[in-house]
Image: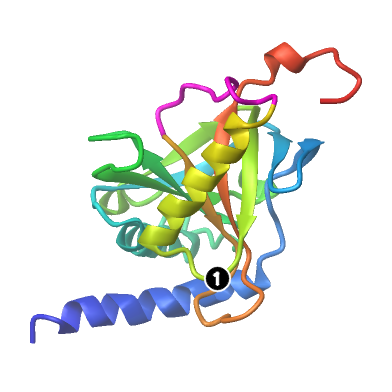
Amino acid sequence: MAKAPRLKITVINLLCLAVLCGATESPQYEVVHAESDFEIRHYRDATWMSATVNDLSFQKATLFGFHRLFQFIQGANMNYSRVAMTSPVVTSLVPGAGPLHSSAYAVRFYLPAKFQDSPPTPLPELNLKPYAWDSHHVAVRKFSGFATDDIAVKEAAKLATSLSLSPWANATSATHYTYSIAQYDPPFRFFGRTNEVWVDVDASRFAGKASF
């Protein structure tokens, strides 16, 4: 009997994530440098809605965080506004016991253009907050399949290795999160899935060069 509530939440979230298939808007960026296994992107200022989740598991944190975000976009806000789904859903690991382990995650939803300047106020019980993600550069590594706890850590480690062997070896930025996993597809898509691991980098020392 104890498993019933968890199963119910899982089913609800699987249905919620299904709307990712119809996602049309994504945060705007420019690729400023490309290697064989990663690229550097410049993202513009953007407003996201963020859910903080205290959990050791990346997968569980994403599930529970997005469940709250989905309620918000379905009208659980002070304006009763329905918000169109966007992609990707980004889960950022907040530093804790170590560089690759934490008890907290931030699950973020990119707000569509019409809500960028004035996001609807979430209902208090959802414990969501707008997050102003300032203009920044990120190193991005793509990977396929499902983003499980183990795979997320392994892909982040692979990106760290690639960066260490590139001109960006000492360019990682100090932020309040270690890395982020961006997911673009619903859970029932078994093939052709697109995921990314993001790490903030400091591109200031490359400024002014014709090409990074």
* Residue 45 placement, left or right of 29: left
Asked if the magenta segment contains residue 14, the reply would be: no
| Mark 1 residue type | Gly
Kindly tell me whether residue 186 is visible in this rendering.
yes
83 and 26: which is toward the camera: 26
Query: What kind of secondary structure does the magenta stretch mostly adopt?
Result: loop
In this rendering, the answer to whether 134 lies above or below 55 is above
* Residue 38 placement, left or right of 81: right
> Could you tell me which quadrant the C terminus lies in?
top right
Residue beneath the point at 29% across and 75% down: 9
63 and 33: which is toward the camera: 33
161 and 122: which is toward the camera: 161
Residue beneath the point at 86% across and 16% down: 209
In this rendering, the answer to whether 189 lies above or below 59 is below
Residue beneath the point at 26% across and 81% down: 8
- The residue indicated by pointer 1 is 145
* Residue 167 placement, left or right of 162: right
Q: Residues within 10 Å of mark 1 (few under 14, many from 20)?
A: some
Identify the secondary structure beneath mark 1: loop
> Could you tell me which quadrant the N terminus lies in?
bottom left
Query: What range of the chain is rendered magenta?
Result: 167-177
- x and y percentages locating residue 179 in the rendered image: 47, 40
- x and y percentages locating residue 198 in the rendered image: 56, 43
Of all residues, the one furthest to the front in this rendering is 165
Residue beneath the point at 63% across and 74% down: 21
In this rendering, the answer to whether 99 lies above or below 2 is above
How many numbered discs, if any?
A: 1
- x and y percentages locating residue 88 in the rendered image: 59, 56
Structure colour scheme: rainbow
